[in-house]
Image (tube, grey):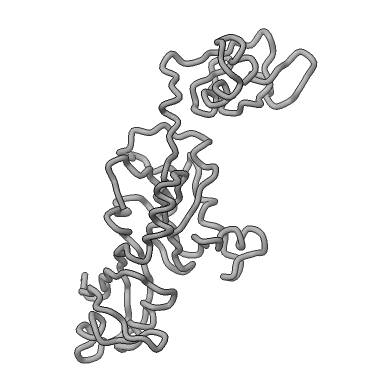
Amino acid sequence: MKNLSTPSNNTERLAKRVAAEHGLSRSAAEQYIEGGFVSVDGALVEVPGARVAPQQKVVLAQDASLDALEPVTLLLHKPPGFEAGLGLEAAAAAHGSRSQGAPPASTLLAPSTHMEGDAADTRVLQRHFRALECFTPLPTPASGLVVYTQDKRIARKLAEDIESLEQECIVEVAGQIADNGLKRLCHGLSFNGRPLPPIKVSWQNETRLRFALKGIRPGQIPSMVEAVGLRVVAIKRIRIGRVPLSKVPEGQWRYLQPWEKF
């Protein structure tokens, strides 16, 4: 197929062609194209401004529907070493990261990193990687669940309620825990001069602790762990509210399903 991005005297915008051939408004034609319903010479094209020649065959799929163009939410398994959330990524991209050049975690969101076997029945489209917001920051050295959304309702929910949503983390530790250390982790420690509320902490195995807590602050878990004689080796967030990371491989992502609620 010829280059669709190079203008020439005998070509026109794909959206104009689709609108004319199907009696659509230009806006509707653009939405159909971005929705993955238009092909040119048998190849899917998602760019309304692509150039097409008169002899090229443009097809609008029979099942094309504007109802399918709902905003999406992506759940990323962030690896250590990436910036994530609340303006950190923009700062990393614009100025170099606060964490020694760490790249933005959003750079991992692409069709090629979509989790194989995602249970969500959603076609991966280029439009799904635009206008994403993140209100679930995660320290650069940590790994685990980070949420990116186009859905204004979910964005508002996370922005307003992140402090009250329980987050579950698996913390790998080293060292010997102090006497009554587990009990103190659950209740009895302070952070930044303030007593911490009761927290659910339990051993997952000999080297990993499970934390379930709300209103987590940067540096809080390492401080708590050090207070009872241990040292953090790694932190992995596996749940936010009622939404789990599930079996998403590190560096990949899945779609939030319609029935999943934070």
Return the x and y of residue 231 as percentages of the image width and height. Answer: 36, 82
State left or right for residue 107 relative to residue 116.
right
State left or right for residue 236 relative to residue 176.
right
State left or right for residue 250 relative to residue 167.
right
Rendered-image quadrant of the N terminus: top right
Which residue is rendered at x = 52% and y = 42% of the image?
A: 129
| Above or below for 21 versus 97 | above
Return the x and y of residue 212 as percentages of the image width and height. Answer: 27, 69
Spot the residue most to the right. 9
Which residue is rendered at x = 38% and y = 62% of the image?
A: 162
Which residue is rendered at x = 27% and y = 55% of the image?
A: 242
Quarter where residue 199 is shown: bottom left
Between 175 and 31, the residue placed more toward the observer is: 31
Between 165 and 41, the residue placed more toward the observer is: 165
Return the x and y of residue 103 as percentages of the image width and height. Answer: 57, 59
Quarter where residue 28 is shown: top right
Which residue is rendered at x = 66% and y = 8% of the image?
A: 55
Return the x and y of residue 229 as percentages of the image width and height. Answer: 31, 89
Between 198 and 84, the residue placed more toward the observer is: 198
Q: How many labels does the image show?
A: 0
| Above or below for 140 versus 232 | above
Spot the residue most to the bottom. 179
Between 225 and 68, the residue placed more toward the observer is: 68
